[in-house]
Image (cartoon, grey):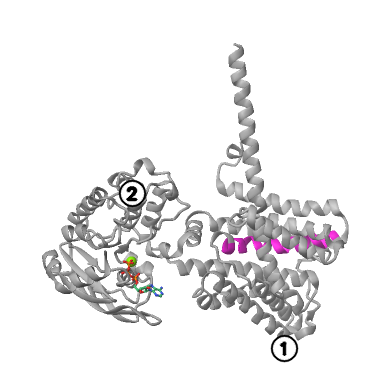
Amino acid sequence: MDPILEIRDLSKRFGGVEAVKAVSFDVPRGSLVGLIGPNGAGKTTFVNLVSKHESPDTGSVLLDKRPIHRLPSFKVARAGLARTYQKNRLFFEESVSENIRTAMIWGGAAKHQDLSYPGLKGKEEERTAELMEFFALTAQRDALPSGLSHLHRRRAEVAQALALAPKLLMLDEPFAGFSREEAFDLIDHLKVCQKGGLTMLLIDHNMEVMLEVCEYLFVMHHGALLASGTSAEVRANPEVINVYLGAET
Amino acid sequence: MIESLLPTRSARAIVGWSIVAAILVLLWVLVDNNYYLRLLISAGIAMIGVIPFGLLMGHMGYMAMGQGGFIGVGAYVVGCLTVQRFEIDIWAALPIAIMVVGALAYAFSFALFRLRGYHFSIGTLALGQLLYLAFDSWEWATGGPHGTSGIPRPAIGEFVFATNSRFLIIVSVFVFLAGFTSWWLARGHVGRALNAIRQDEDLAGARGLDVLRYKQLIFTFAAVWAGLAGGLYGSMQISIDPSSFTIWGSFQYVIYVIIGGAGTLLGPVIGVIFITVLDQLIADVGVWNQMILGALIVITVLFFRGGLWGGIRMLWALALKNRSADRSAVSTQAGAAE
Ligand SMILES: Nc1ncnc2c1ncn2[C@@H]1O[C@H](COP(=O)(O)OP(=O)(O)OP(=O)(O)O)[C@@H](O)[C@H]1O
Ligand SMILES: [Mg+2]
């Protein structure tokens, strides 16, 4: 296996809460992996640690063999790791196209030659237009985030993250509030990007969708990695069943 | 029409800020009275410090409450270099003062920008207070509670800006420079970065912006101009003591920005003018003037988020809309008559 992301012994404590406990795993290059776990399992904290929104107490993170856990968040982003947020986040005073273009400017010109998903080639204007077209946002180009539907806002957020031309994209519950059709529509788009070389780590509570879509799954519980495997393996794992039956209705 | 006369944005900025500076000088012709003349100079000096401060507080959303300290450092460095301990020319002392304040602000910015929101405000407040204590106790450099006196006025060759009317000219030139450099800095990518930091700085970082660098840049820029304002203040007053550089001075900058309009370059200018005029109007009502001022701040914060300048622009937009509505009404009437 050729891992693009190597997590070793990552931990974070908030006062008495061990939000992430000695988590280690690898994400294979070009894969679409899932991270699941009940509420409060530490999934968002994990993403925050890797993207450096928070500093880990211990542990290391290698992106493409390069240590990134000591870099500030903007350097992590420029190194090729982008993320989206559980609670939708965009620059609320900027239009959709400005939101996308801004990330493009700050992230630096597309520099990862081995990638080939939408929005990577040409000048900023062309790249922005291509990304908006890909996510069917062209009609909303001048709209403010507050004027967008939930669906469009989510898409705009993913488009903004992709504007960084990342190698790895971490999506924190992108399907929350989506119907099954809407979730699969976004997944279809993500799969196109995967064909273009993008690696993805997906977080969601919708088990049905996750088990169907992800090639490999990691299960977190109480901050620690509880299990990992293919969807068949995870589905059959008694500990996972126990946790999910215990925590979710 | 303005676009056709002044095709580039920088030309418009130069002309705009020249007009602001020119108004300041021309007002002197109208007042012709030393008391009002000093008010004009004070207002000009306040503008020099508060226009760049507006970028920090308004554009970037970091309400620093220690600018009074930087004003004081600027004033005392000039005082120390020109009279207290050395006797160098004020034209040499001013740039040194600027460098000292800039270095100080930059050094403290590392610690201060570990803080956000009101924590940052409290942190800067503490820094301002710390500097105030230094002014009061470091007698060697500052003269302690008695302060420093005999700070000279600048001169160009034989021409000494000794009289207040001459001094106003220098102040106006620096008002222009403060306005123009702030505009220059805020246009384009720095302005975009500042707005993004105000909206969501974590997101800006996650999208590749070196947030800390921009914060430090703007904090230092605002401090440098506050320091220059302080140097000019010292020169205007001739003698200074710690009582001029208390928290109240820092607080006033914040008020100028809130009342005038945060997030715009002209807002702080309007704020200074408004407060200066208001101070004169309510000076006679004793304790009540503080209450009136307080009430105005509350009203502005509650109802005019854009401050006075925001209000003016809103009225202007309304007037334009009414005019075009009148016109279209006239033209439809004309059309109906035909
Ligand atoms: N900044 C913080 N300060 C204190 N505690 C925190 C902080 N962030 C997270 N926690 C705690 O860490 C634990 C993990 O939270 P986290 O948000 O990572 O879980 P999650 O798996 O994303 O949950 P969900 O599925 O509800 O989004 C929780 O107990 C939470 O209360
Ligand atoms: Mg979460």
Q: State which region is magenta.
A: B36-57
In terms of secondary structure, what is the magenta stretch mainly? helix
Q: Which residue is mark 2?
A: A151
Q: CA distance from mark 1 to mark 2?
A: 66 Å
Crowdedness near tag 2: few (<14), some (14–19) or many (≥20) residues, C-alpha within 10 Å? some
Left of B162 or right of it: where is B102? left
Q: Which mark is residue B162?
A: none
Give B196 or B170, whichever is nearer the viewer.
B196
Provide residue B198's location: percent of width, then percent of height. 51, 61
Of the 4 image quadrants, the one containing the N terminus of chain A is: bottom left
| Residue B268 visible in this rendered orientation of the protein | no
- Residue B263's place in the image compared with B78, above or below, is above
Position of residue B159 measured from the top left corner of the image (x, y, whole percent)? 79, 64
Q: Are marks 1 and 2 in contact (CB under 8 Å)?
A: no
- A142 left or right, relative to A77: right
Residue A11: x, y in percent?
31, 80
User: The C terminus of chain A lies in which quarter of the figure?
Assistant: bottom left
Look at the image and tell me whether residue B312 can be seen.
yes
Residue B131 location, x and y as percent? 66, 80
Q: Quadrant of residue B153?
A: bottom right
Query: Ligand 1 appears in which quadrant?
Result: bottom left
Looking at numbered disc 2 in the image, what kind of residue is underneath it?
A: Leu
Q: Type of residue at label 1?
A: Trp
Q: Residue at x 86, y 62 (%)?
A: B285
Magenta segment includes B171: no
Q: Is mark 2 within 8 Å of ligand 2?
A: no
Mark 1 Cβ and ligand 1 under 8 Å apart: no
- The residue drawn where x is 56% and y is 41% is B7
| Residue where numbered disc 1 is placed | B140
Label 1: few (<14), some (14–19) or many (≥20) C-alpha neighbours in 10 Å:
few
Disc 1 sits on a residue from what chain? Answer: B
